[in-house]
Image: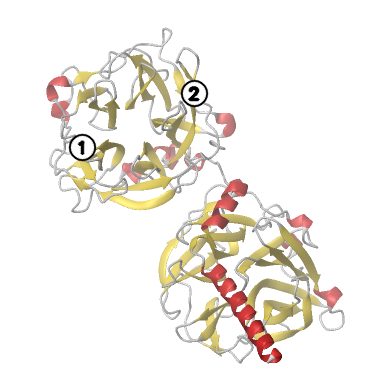
Amino acid sequence: MKKLLLTSLIAFVASGFSTAIQAQNDEPKVAFLFTYFTGNAPHEEQICYALSDDGYNYTPLNHGNPVIKSDTIAYTGCVRDPHILRGEDGKTFYMVITDMKSSLGWSSNRGMVLMKSTDLINWTHSAINFPTKYPKTWGNVIRVWAPETIYDHVAKRYMVFYSLRTSDEDSFDRIYYSYVNDDFTDLIGEPKWLFDAGNATIDGDIVYNEADQLYHLFYKQESGRGIYQAVAPKLTDRWTMLDGHVEQTNKAVEGVGVCKSLDGKTWIVMYDCYGDGHYQFCTSEDLKTFKWVQDTHTTGKFTPRHGTIMPITQAEKDRLLLHYGNHTNPILPDFHADPEVLYSNQTGKYYIYSTTDGYRGWGGWKFNVFSSEDLVNWKDEGTMLDVRSDQVSWANGNAWAPAAIEVKQKDGSYKYYFYFSAHNPKTNRKEIGVAVSDSPTGPFVDSGKAIVTDEERPAAARGGQAIDVDVFYDAKSKKYYLYWGNGFMAGAELNADMLSIKKETTTLLTPQGGSLQTWAYREAPYVFFRKGTYYFLWSVDDTGSPNYHVCYGTAKSPLGPIQQVNGEYPTILQQDPSQFIYGTAHNSVLQVPGKDQWYIVYHRINKNFLGRNQSPGTHREVCIDALTFDKKGNIIPVRPTHEGPQPLK
């Protein structure tokens, strides 16, 4: 009876422990952590982190700088090919890395580094040197490449597999494996052969596919110049090679990594197009057919090389952001311009709408919306209006410079009005339309026509186009106003339906005087109210000029007249060549709800496209910095930064 009770108790405890482990593994995953290195120079052979909410679009952490210094963990002082794995307990993480300094030659590395962590920030490490550990059998090893870790449920141990090659004349790279001791500090026993394709076989990555109950080994075959697959029912069984390439490109590739999507329905397949400096991402439903999704957009320090991704929980994401959060400009990925920032009382989040940039002749046709809870980390919520689609019947392109506002309805619900400019093929002019939604992310329904055309320009205004719209709610009068104009600034009161303007209120507001290079109005009006004063901001010079900058004046009413500040229209945002910051203008302004805390959101020219022949005016990026005032209410000139503000709590 005692034995029976003891056995039952052990079984109960074991069952409870297993259930706890399963609960930890089943905690919802909300993002992906990408571990990678960035290049072949010693300062680039370091471990870096990036985050993604979808597994395809990544934002580097820690300003793109390393999160672990290689010279503190590796024999060579450099590392490559980091592979990260969540342990079976759900809360321990393992990383294995190639211990290599490529400037010494491609056949110069002799080992790997084993690492372990419980928080993804603090890591223990142990460097394994094969000639020292295996002097008789592997004393002449010249390559120990791209190690990875997987848990072997048969052996009930973690297995590390990697490519080995010696200096023997007939040697080529083959994939071997070793088991690891309990504290993940050393390899157990001699390396054992796992697989090779009959020629150089490197960069192995193994996943288990429940659908066919097989392990899938992805690897680079140097002879075939591509990525291939082999399958086996158990990790140490004989592997069966499959026909066909995995990669969806003719470019040279390596460093394949395969991971389940967050919903578990598809696979993310990624590999390093190392000759072209970017990653390529594919998707697969069955690990038999693979479909190209996109290439990474590498900018600044984000030039990822041979790494791996791992799903993480919200708590893990928050911890990484707290420790390594970028607080960096630009805040949106890729090229965007003309940002409009909005706080939604309905969702408690911030939103940015912008021109999708990077198209010749400002030829973009869609608007995407980005959301954030802290003004620093932004999520792409997708396309909320496409002017080439059936969504907008009166326009066919040039989706530019939006404005948006949240309006609370009498029943307590909210509506969102999205004003934008686009090309009207019937008039061959840029005109302003409006679309409406019950959500800040859409779907938005267009009103069906342009609401501001050349007919709505003030009589005294000449030239320019009906673009660069701004919408403003005047809390004093409880009225809404619209502003627009390129070459002139016009303003008018909106009708109660928010879908049209009161033409009789249209007013010419263009600040007078000033040279093109100082404060002469060009475009992009923006209006906000603070402590009894209406502030009018606008952009000066050309959007493709490094000198593109922001000036402002004040007024006593939403329709002016605009007055100078201390006898002039001050410049409050301009380029800083010493920091390689250019073309800082076309802004919106945000007040943190309930606080006298303000931010200016603007675009600048991506420094890699600064020259006139590189189309700087269509390669712009969105940034944010603090906006402050002196005791008299004057705007203190903004210092544009790469750091940006600290995240809001």
Residue 451 vertical placement versus 55 (above, below): above
Residue type pointed to by label 2: Thr
Find residue 628 and name its label: 2
Q: Please give left or right for residue 369 compared with residue 310 in the image.
A: left
Classed neighbour count for the residue bearing mark 2: other residues with Cα under 10 Å, few (<14), some (14–19), many (≥20): some
Find residue 284 and name its label: none
Q: Which residue is mark 1?
A: 410
Are the residues flagged by discs 2 and 1 in contact, CB closer than 8 Å?
no
Q: How many marks?
A: 2
Residue 440 vertical placement versus 94 (above, below): above
Give the mark, 2 or 1, whose residue is nearer the N terminus.
1
Element carrying mark 1: loop
- Image quadrant in which you'd find residue 356: top left
Residue visible at 65% across and 73% down?
148
Q: Nearer the viewer, residue 267 or 121?
A: 121
The image position of residue 49, as x and y in percent, is 60, 55
Q: Please give left or right for residue 278 compared with residue 102 in the image.
A: left
Which quarter of the rendered picture does the N terminus lie within?
Answer: bottom right
* Colour scheme: secondary structure
Q: Please give left or right for residue 592 compared with residue 388 in the image.
A: right
Q: Nearer the viewer, residue 601 or 610?
A: 601
Classed neighbour count for the residue bearing mark 1: other residues with Cα under 10 Å, few (<14), some (14–19), many (≥20): few
